[in-house]
Amino acid sequence: MTPQQLHGIALVRKRIDEIDNTVLDLLKERLDCARTIGKLKDESKRAKWDPQRELEIYERLRKNNADVFPPAALYSIFHEIITTCRLSQRKATVAYLGPEATFTHQAGVRYFGQTASYQPMESIPEVFQEVERERVQYGIIPVENSIEGAVTYSLDSFLLYKVQICGEIKLPINHNLVNRSGNMEDIKTVVSHSQALAQCRQWLRKHLPGVPAMPVFSTATAAKMAAEDPSLAAIASSLAITTYQLQVVVRGIEDFQGNKTRFLVLGDKSPSRCGNDRTSVVFGLINRPGALNEVLTILSAKGIDMTKLESRPAKNQLWQYVFFVDMVGHIEDPPVHEACNILKQICAYFEILGSYPAAEAAMPAD
Ligand SMILES: O=C(O)C(=O)C[C@]1(C(=O)O)C=C[C@@H](O)C=C1
């Protein structure tokens, strides 16, 4: 490098330092503003979390940016800034299906940012229980996977606990083969959750033939085991790599690309309408021909787009079923409100599980 070039770099670095200092000063000022709003919301007993306002911010920044700054990075920077400001108004406590570094934990961090207080639970019902007893503000549970289908423990828990759905997160599931050394030759056994092993079956057969695969409680448990035993490799989330200080042997070993899991955020009350919302309900039918058809006809007559219909055994009565339906719209939208009022009258059992911003609204960069 010539002396002129070195001088040029030094000059631009000086400017970068000035910019960083200005950005930091502005961030501190933004934090102050959020705290002031937090106090005003306290006085007027308004909820701190305002998803509609957050959505407006992302939308304005997206337009102003015109794709100059990489949009995904812009989103994740402002997501961290906004969640930090929101948490400064009140630190969110979040229970999730643990142990630490599961995909559910990763989904929680994406939604609530790094600074929330996270509490791992041993089972899905325990997450529901913590929210119901108000020991935490929010809970995160997996509800369906694009390959494996519904997470039945989660659906069944809605029948046992009184909680509201406050949000949804759709997380791409990338499986990473990780161990202590980062070398394939050290692997004597592969450990992971049975679903992760199943989703990487072909890859394992091709690249690690004859190496036994052992199912364990979760991908995070597998990562922890691999951190303690150099002969083990785990299939785990990217959060597990940093949490357990592991090395990547191969990233993205899943057999089918585009594998996503949908997670739900549980709380004690759903947020107000943001304009791109979903509403989830569960109902049981009076046993007579055409009963389900009648429900579907009501939804279609109101022009409601149904995004999911799932049935589960009712448990308390043999061969009786309950149905979980997700629809486009918020309970404050007249068509959804009216349809739910009719369904309440014609169903043997009917419960609104919550209205919440669609994953695409809460995470616009996805
Ligand atoms: O505008 C508000 O209502 C705020 O509380 C500020 C803020 C933000 O940091 O921009 C924080 C939390 C809300 O969810 C929305 C926005």
Image (spheres, rainbow, N blue to C red):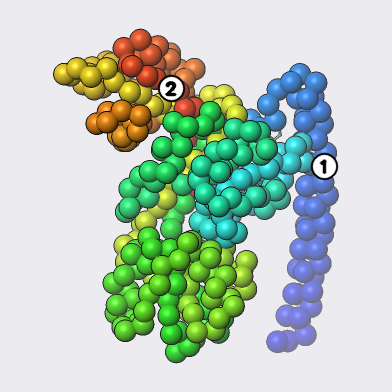
Q: Which residue is mark 2?
A: 351
Quadrant location of the N terminus in the rendered image = bottom right
Q: Is residue 224 left or right of residue 301?
A: right
Q: Identify the disc placed on residue 346.
A: none
Mark 2 to mark 1 CA distance (whole Å): 44 Å
Q: Amino acid at mark 2?
A: Glu
> x and y percent of residue 189 in the render?
43, 80
189 or 316, nearer to the observer: 316
Q: Which residue is disc 1 drawn over?
A: 29
Q: Residue at x 66, y 33 (%)?
A: 134
Q: Nearer the viewer, residue 32 or 47?
A: 47
Q: Is residue 165 left or right of residue 87?
A: left
Q: What percent of the width, then of the height, locates residue 252? A: 42, 68
Residue 116 placement (x, y as % from top left): 69, 47
Residue 238 appearing in the image: no
- Say whether mark 1 is within 8 Å of ligand 1: no
309 with respect to 142 (left or right): left
Q: Residue drawn 61% across and 52% down?
A: 120
Which residue is depicted at the point 83% across and 39% down? 32
Residue 190 left/right relative to 357: left
At 32% from the left and 16% from the top, the residue drawn is 347
Q: Tag 2's secondary structure? A: strand
